[in-house]
Image (spheres, helix red, strand yellow):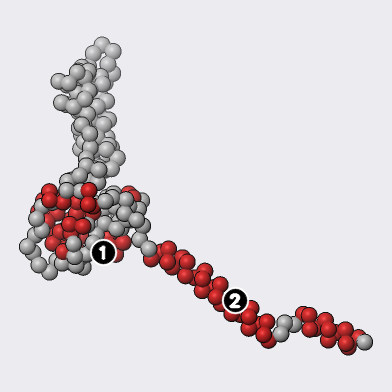
Amino acid sequence: MIELAMREQGAIIRPSMKMKMKLAFTLSAFGLLLAGIPATAQDAPPPNKWDITKIDVTKLPPAADKQDLTFDKDIAPLFKASCVRCHGTQRPKKNLRLDSLETVLKGGQDGKMVVPGDSKQSLLVAAAACIDDSIAMPPKRGPRRGPGGPGGPGNGGPPPGPPGGPDAGPGGGPGGPGGPDGPGGPGGPGGGPGGPGGGPGGRGPGGPPPKPLTAEQVGLIRAWIDQGAK
C-alpha cells in the first residue's frame, strides 16, 4: 500500500514527457516574444515632430560642388565650432547629438534629422540654414539688453552711474568705472566671470552664443548628405 501511494504521489509530482515538451515550447515562444518587443521598439525611429513639406526649402543655399566629403574630415569641424556645445555628449538638447556620424544619423527627440542622399528632405539642413524660425539652429534670440537695446542708453533706460560720489564707495557707483556693471566691475567689460572679457566662459556662464553656420557651410552639409552622408 505504501509503495502504491508513493507511485501515485510521484505521478502527481513528476509531469509526463508530453507535458514537459508543451511547457518547454510555451516558455520558448514567450521568451522570443519578450525578446522581440524591445528590439522592435529600439529599432523604430521616433516620429518626426517637424513636417519638412511645410518648410520652404527653396530658400536653402545651393549644395557645394566639393566631392568625396566625409563626416570626420569635412562636417565634424563645422558642428564642433557651432553645434556641439548644445548637441554634444553633455545633456544634448532634444536628445540630439551632432558629435559623431552615428548620432547624427540616429536623430533625436524630434525624429531623424538627416535623409542620406536627399538634403532637401533633411531637417538638419533647414535648421542649420535658419530658413524657418521655429527650427532654426541656433535658435534666434530676442533683442539684447544694453546700449541701444531695451533698458540701455538711448532707449529709455537709466543712465550709467557716476564714477563716484559722496556716498559711493571705492570703485564708483553702479554702472560707473569699477562699480557693478561698469568697466572693471563684476559683470562689466573686463570684470569677473560671466562678464564680457571676464573669467572662463566669456560673456555669460556658457560664453558667447554660438554663431550660425554660413551659407557656404550649409551648402557643404547639403553636398555631404546628397553624397550619402558617410
Residue 26 lies in quadrant = bottom right
Total tally of numbered discs in the picture:
2
Residue 43 picture location, percent across and down:
38, 66
Q: For residue 88, which numbered disc appears in the image?
A: none
Q: Visible in this render: residue 92?
A: no
In the image, residue 172 above or below residue 11: above
Q: Earlier in the sequence, mark 2 or mark 1?
A: 2
Disc 2 secondary structure class: helix
Residue 170 picture location, percent across and down:
26, 21
Disc 1 secondary structure class: helix
Whether residue 69 sits left or right of residue 46 in the image: it is left
Q: Nearer the viewer, residue 139 or 202?
A: 139
- Report the Cα–Cα distance between label 2 and label 1: 42 Å
Residue shown at the point (15%, 67%) measured from the top left: 227
Which kind of residue does numbered mark 2 sit on?
Thr
- Quarter of the image with the N terminus is bottom right
Q: For residue 26, which numbered disc appears in the image?
A: 2
Q: Visible in this render: residue 23?
A: yes
Which kind of residue does numbered mark 1 sit on?
Leu
Spot the residue most to the right: 1
Spot the residue most to the top: 166
Residue 52 picture location, percent across and down:
23, 52
The residue carrying pointer 2 sits among few (fewer than 14), some (14 to 19) or many (20 or more) residues within 10 Å by Cα, namely few
Residue shown at the point (29%, 40%) measured from the top left: 205
In the image, residue 139 above or below residue 35: above
Q: Nearer the viewer, residue 130 or 72?
A: 130
In the image, residue 147 above or below residue 17: above
Q: For residue 101, which numbered disc appears in the image?
A: 1
Residue shown at the point (21%, 36%) measured from the top left: 196
Whether residue 169 sits left or right of residue 63 in the image: it is right
- Quarter of the image with the C terminus is bottom left
Residue shown at the point (16%, 64%) measured from the top left: 226
